[in-house]
Image (cartoon, helix red, strand yellow):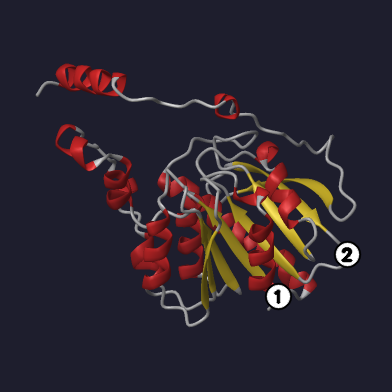
Amino acid sequence: MKLSTLLLFLILFSACTTIEIKEEDAFDNHRTVTPESFSSQNLTLSNKTIETDDGVTLNAWHLTRDDAQATVLYFGGNGFLMVKSRPLIEAYSNMPVNIILFDYRGYGLSSGEPSVEGIQTDARTMYRHADALSDSLSIPLYIHGHSMGSFLSTYTAKREDVAGYILESPVSEVSGWTKKLVPWLLRPFVRFDIDSNIASQNNLERVASITSPLLVIGSTEDNITPFEMAEDLYKASASSDKKLVSIEGGNHNDLPYFGNYATSIEEFIFN
């Protein structure tokens, strides 16, 4: 069947069904935050410029508080920018933790162009930076990766002795992910040509060799990284201290808006 024939079939098929589009689904709004507009009773924002080993300049934020008992280094997803981090910051704001955010190379005000190797260099650089800050305060360092950032969370946790790591809406491994993105009926007609550097990223293999405490957070409504990926990673984890949290009603990018998101993170870090 030619692709054009398939598309025609899908159009005709969909014409026999009702697709509901609600008013709230029509907008993809983001509440932004900048160093100039930032305001918080608990956190102080400091803008930082950090240079990687290969000469790229990363734009980073320190969100600190006097009573911090831990530091969290956050690895965002593919579409993450610090200016879009207001919900995340608000979710963390009542916990006694310092938060370190940054924009990957080629994102926001950071220089360079993104690549798998380059992003991993960014992760190593930011880990050293966050680790130095934590050591100076004698507090533990946790890492938190969302979606694509889950690969960097496992990459770092496998290399370093972290206090614990968080995988939010994670990807288990790339080839399995692409299969889940396409309904089984269409798989004979859809092929993914994935760069080998991307295809080689496998969180299932990494978590199987990481013994650090693990928190996996996901939603059964996630249509980008299905919750079964979170379940698979939880089962594959070598950690004896691990927890899987399902947030009902959440999707891929909105989990920080839910109350049990912050509660599960705080319990993970402090209990």
Q: Secondary structure at mark 2?
A: loop
Residue at (41%, 53%) from the top-left corner?
Answer: 171
Q: Nearer the viewer, residue 245 or 37?
A: 245
Other-residue count near label 2 (Cα within 10 Å), few / some / many at <14 / 14–19 / ≥20:
few
Residue at (34%, 58%) from the top-left corner?
Answer: 202
Q: Which residue is mark 2?
A: 66
Q: Nearer the viewer, residue 86 or 5?
A: 5
The quarter of the rendered structure image containing the N terminus is: top left
Coordinates of residue 267 in the picture (x, y in percent): 67, 72
Identify the mark at residue 138; answer none if there is no mark.
Answer: none
Q: Nearer the viewer, residue 144 or 123?
A: 144
Other-residue count near label 1 (Cα within 10 Å), few / some / many at <14 / 14–19 / ≥20:
few
Identify whether 222 is placed above or below 83: below
Q: Evaluate if marks 2 and 1 touch, with contact meaning CB atoms under 8 Å apart.
A: no
How far separated are the C-alphas under marks 2 and 1?
A: 17 Å
Identify whether 124 is placed above or below 195: below
Q: Amino acid at mark 1?
A: Phe
The quarter of the rendered structure image containing the C terminus is: bottom right
Q: Which residue is mark 1?
A: 270
Residue at (38%, 61%) from the top-left corner?
Answer: 203
Q: Secondary structure at mark 1?
A: helix
Q: Earlier in the sequence, mark 2 or mark 1?
A: 2
